[in-house]
Amino acid sequence: MTSAEVHERIADLRAQVARHDELYHRQAKPEVTDFEYDLLKSELAGLEAKYPQFKAADSPTTRVGDDRLEGFATYRHRLPMQSLDNTYSEADLRAFHQRLVNLFGLEDLAYVVEPKIDGVAVSLTYEKGALVRAVTRGSGFEGDEITANARTIRTLPKELKRPGSKGAKGAPVPNVVEIRGEIYMTLAEFERINHEREEAGEAPFANPRNLTAGTIKQLDTREVARRKLEIVLYGSGFCDPALDHAAASAGTQNAFHGLVKAWGLPSVERFWTTHGIDETWKAVQELDKLRHSFAYATDGAVVKLDSFAQQREAGSTAKAPRWAIAYKFAAERAETRLKAITVQVGRTGVLTPVAELEPVLLAGTTVARATLHNQDEIARKDIRVGDFVMVEKAGEVIPAVVGVNTARRLPECVAYVFPAVCPVCGTRTVRYEGEVAVRCPNVNCPAQVRRRVQHFVSKAGVDVEGLGEAMVDTLVEKGWVKSIPDLYRLQRDDLLLLGKSVEKSTDNLLAALEASKHAELWRFINGLGIPHVGASAAKDLAGKFGSLEALTEARRDDLLAIAGIGETMADAIIAHFNEPRNRALVSQLLTLGVAPAAPARPPGGPGQLSGRTFVLTGTLPTLSREEAAVKIDAAGGKVSSSVSRKTSYVLAGDEAGSKLEKARSLGVPVIDEREFLQMLGG
Ligand code: IVH
């Protein structure tokens, strides 16, 4: 390369890295994988090292990412929050160890190996044991104050447990302590929100990390509370008195994890204390096998010197500590042929393209379908039918097509043309300004009818027993159900035509439909499928308006007066009921005898746990399990012995075991005794 070419390449790389920094840190919408990003950055660092004459003071290689946004107060960390150097190879990890061996003149160094949680870094400050502040990493020196948002995290204690705290182990509490960790979202919650967004015509988030970053930076705390965030703590910042002397003589990272637990804070699921590099490498590999059972997405292992004294001695470079390193696991990726692109039509008419793949093994499961998100994504990646595509598991569960191997593209592969008509009813599709979604505008499209009816009768709707998805398909296919009210117009004689000996099930179905006319009001509201309105908003609306008629007449101001209803939702509700067809639907339901049950009693009264299922695990600080079960029963709730997706809450005490893990992996909320008693209004 000539000097001019080098200069040009450096400028190009700097621009690319800066753009990806902006997309990643500020917009939470990265376009490349971490690996691709690291490749660009290391090429840039290599050129800058070789050609020092082109080194610039503000190169992205010397700057750390900055995620500060307007609208939040800036807060200076008492001790900077550093980032970590990344490695992708065993050799690099061994080189890291060798540097420390040379420094200390000791082979047998003790390390702690921890999962690298793929979330958003946060620093919490507890003063005299009380949570006073939560701040993002920001520039590393100062970040955004997100305390109000962090307080919505149900598993984050507002008070540290001290010795003698009721029923808890506790540990001495310093005057001031900064505790660092990661805010994340379970995979179940990620899927729930993405599904809701797709239905509302919005671009889905690529992975749980981006969604977490987007959520934590919302100015409207009420919106944050609707998305269930979680947290895990793994590090220490400023501490007065110093941690070595304070609580539980936490002079090691190993002891620090014990301290985090004793204070009652959520800690990493597993960590390994190792000696020397061979043991450390073994632990890293073991973590790689285990990590899929964790509640959070992990993208690597963090290896840290165990002793705080040794950490101090090793020190830091401008950007990262010398005593720790992140070993990134290779992304689980596979290449396979894209056989076809099918397009599904959702409840609100949104067309979602799906990749039909030559089945391929990916992270232990066979993948034959993957999401392509929307029209723009296909165009941006230039994905063509017949291509060999790279499939990755975003957030480790949902496969997505991340790119094309153009070297293997055959000449007959032509650019994909997104359907101009609905694949189900043939209506010309539309795309509204500002939306990524392409929609079928025909509300009578059988695909939409089917999905709307399925949603209405589902467990999140009026919950009609015996009316599963397949049965709804049949009813729509037969032309008996063209809209939700048609469910209540079904004729016994028609249903009997469906086959022999269906008499009993027909009668059961009709009885279940009849009973559903008196489902709770929020179930109808949720079942209507108003964009952006989910179950928890439906409950708020039911509590405020008390009837379907009143809701159809809601004014914007009335809606905004409800805690938990933001502008987007208020506008969606107004737009929904401005549509004559939607108003007609409600009045038809009422004419057909729909009479929702009175809204659930306000918290504190008897019956406030009705419809909720609890699983008890571990030893509670004050209540015995029997006492807790009696309280649940008295409040109308149910107690179950095993955790499933249907569990509403896991009430966990000390020494909680596999049930707690199961709850975490399914994204079931875990509460402690104090939160439980609060729920009961006590
Ligand atoms: S220690 C100076 N431990 O990874 C030490 N970081 O790539 C700084 N991360 O900014 C962090 N899991 O947000 C540490 N077990 C873990 C981690 C972890 C995830 C994140 C953290 C950090 C980033 C660095």
Image (cartoon, rainbow, N blue to C red):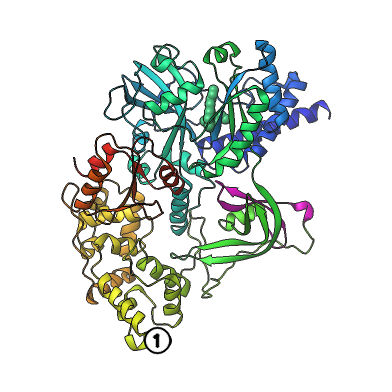
Quadrant (top left/top right/bottom left/bottom right) for the N terminus: top right
Residue 593 lies in the magenta stretch: no
In what element is the residue under mark 1?
A: loop
Quadrant (top left/top right/bottom left/bottom right) for the C terminus: top left
Residue 329 against residue 583 in the figure, above or below: above
Q: Residue at the location (67% across, 11% down)?
A: 103
Residue 11 against residue 557 in the figure, above or below: above
Tally of marks: 1
How far across and down, in percent of the image, does residue 480 sit? Answer: 39, 82
| Residue 660, quarter of the rendered image | top left
Left or right, 12 with reference to 509: right
Read off the magenta span: 383-408
Which of 170/308 is in front? 170
How far across and down, in percent of the image, does residue 623 sit? Answer: 24, 38
Which of 593/343 is in front? 593
Residue that extends furthest to the left in the rendered view of this protein: 605
Residue neighbourhood size for the residue with mark 1, other residues' Cα within 10 Å, grouped as few (<14), some (14–19), many (≥20): few
Residue 336 against residue 102 in the figure, above or below: below
How far across and down, in percent of the image, does residue 669 sit? Answer: 37, 45
The kind of residue on which mark 1 rests is Ser
How far across and down, in percent of the image, does residue 239 sit? Answer: 41, 16
Q: Is mark 1 within 8 Å of ligand 1?
A: no
Q: Is residue 86 visible?
A: no
Residue 396 lies in the magenta stretch: yes
> What residue sits right under mark 1 in the picture?
501
Q: Is residue 623 visible?
A: yes
| Residue 136, quarter of the rendered image | top left
Which of 149/220 is in front? 149
Q: Residue at the location (58% across, 11% down)?
A: 313
Q: Residue at the location (40% across, 88% down)?
A: 497
